[in-house]
Image (tube, grey):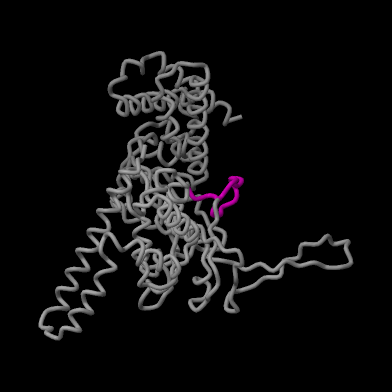
Amino acid sequence: MTTPQDIRDAIEQFLTELYEKKCADAQKKRHGVTDEKKLQSIENDLTPYHPNNWISQKALVFAEQLKFGTHLAKHTHSDSKGDNVYFSAQNSLPENLCASQSVPQDEYILDATGNAAALPLAKFFDIAIGQTTLKQLLLQDNHAVHGVFADNEQQSLEYCRIFQAALKAENQHPKSDERNKQLLWFCADETEENKQYQVLIPLYPVALVHCLYNKVQQRFADTVKNGEKARKENKAYSQKYATVHDLAFVKLGGANPQNLSQINSKQGGKHFLLPSLPPQFNAGKVHFSRRAKSFFVDSLLYRSQIADDLKAVVESDKHTMDIRNKRKLALYSLCGKILSLAAVYREQPAGWTKDYALESPSEIYWLDPNNPRFAEQPPDWQQHIAGRFSHWLIAWLKKQFPHEKHHFNDTEDREVFKSFQAALLFGDK
C-alpha cells in the first residue's frame, strides 16, 4: 500500500535531482561572468527550481502550458490548437474488434503536447512510487496524494485538483481547430424527412498506437533474434515468437519530434503503418527442418499455439473436475491443431518428403500419402503415429516439469495415445 510518506520521498528525490541539474547548468553560466546584474539574473532563474519552490512556481504554470490526453489533435496536423481528450474505457470490445479499449490497463499511457519547456511536469507525473506512478495515483484520486504537494493541507489539495484536471484534460468548452479533419456522420433514421448529421472530429489514438509501437519493437528481442537465426539455419526452435512483415512507418514532428508530444519524442517521431490489404498466406510451404527425424518436434507445440495453455493446466496443483476437463480440452485442442497442420503437408506434391530426414514410414505415409514408394498402407500406421505422438508429448512434459516426472506415467501415456488415435481415425472418415 502506497503511503503519503512514500510519495513525499519520491517527490523530494525528483525535485532534488532536478535542482542539482539546474545548479550545474547555472555554474557553467557563471563561469567568466563578472557583471553583478547578470550573476543576479542567473540566481533569480535558479530560485524557482529550488525543491521548496518548484511545485508552486513552476509546476502550476506548466500545468497550464501542457495538454494531456489519450487522443490528441496535434498529430493530425502539427499546427492544430485543438484540445486533447482523455478517454477511459468502461466497457470491453468484442474479440473481432480492436481499439483503445484493447490496450491493457498497465500499458495505457497519457501523452503531453504544448510548450516543450514544460515537459518536466510530464516527467514529474511519471515518478515511480513502488509498483505505480504519481500519474496513476492522481488519476485514481488516491487519498494518499491529497496532502503531499504543500505543507498546508488545503493548498496541497488545491494543487492536487489542478494536476488532476490537467491530466484528465478537463475542459468545460473543448474546442477544435480548422486544421483538424471533420466528418459528417449520418445519424437519423432513413425514413425521416429531415436528415440529421453529427460532426465527428477524428483524434490520434496515442495510447493504442504506442502499444502497437512497443509490440512491433519486440522484433529486436533476443527471443526473436534467436528464432530468426534458427529458422535461417534450418534448426528447430522451441520458443514462440512473432514477426511483422511488410512494415512501413511515417515520421511526425520533423527534425525535433519533441515539439509534437512527449511520446512522439520517445518514439523518435516514428509511427508504424501496418498493411491494410488482406494477408496472403502461403499454406503450401513446409516449415519444419529437413534434418528433423520426426514430425513431432518441440517447436510444433509453439507453432500450434497451444503450449502455453497446456503448461497452464498442468501447472495447476488442483485436481478438481474443472481442471481435469481443461486438461482434456487442451489435449484435444492440441490434437486438432496438429492434424490441421498435417493436412497442409498432405496436400503437397507427391514425394515431397524425399528431401527430408523423416525416419518413420508411418509418418511419411501420413504426411505424404501419394508418395510412389508406398504400394499400400504401412501396417498399423495410425497406431504407430499415435504412439510416437504420445511418447513425444510425455517426454516434452517431463522436460517442462522435471519435479513432477512421476505424474507422467504409463497411464498418462495411454490416455494421450488413445486421444490422438481417435483424432486420426476421425480425421480419415
Q: Inspect this view and state whether residue 251 appears.
A: no
Name the residue at 52% across, 44% down. 347
User: Above or below — where is 308 with respect to 7?
Assistant: above
Q: Is residue 48 left or right of residue 125?
A: left
Task: Give whichever of 262, 18 is nearer the camera.
Answer: 18
Q: Residue 311: name its quadrant.
A: top left
Indicate the position of residue 276 as horizontal and vertical percent values: 55, 63
Left or right of residue 22: residue 393: right
Choose between 202 and 175: the one closer to the eye.
175
Q: Is residue 101 magenta?
A: yes
Magenta-highlighted stretch: main secondary structure? loop
Residue 246 colored in magenta in the image: no
Give the quarter of the figure containing the N terminus. top left
The single residue placed furthest to the bottom in the displayed view is 35
Image x and y of residue 361, in percent: 40, 32
Residue 221: where, in percent of width, then height?
Answer: 31, 52
Please give left or right for residue 117 compared with residue 14 in the image. right
Q: Which residues are magenta?
A: 89-104
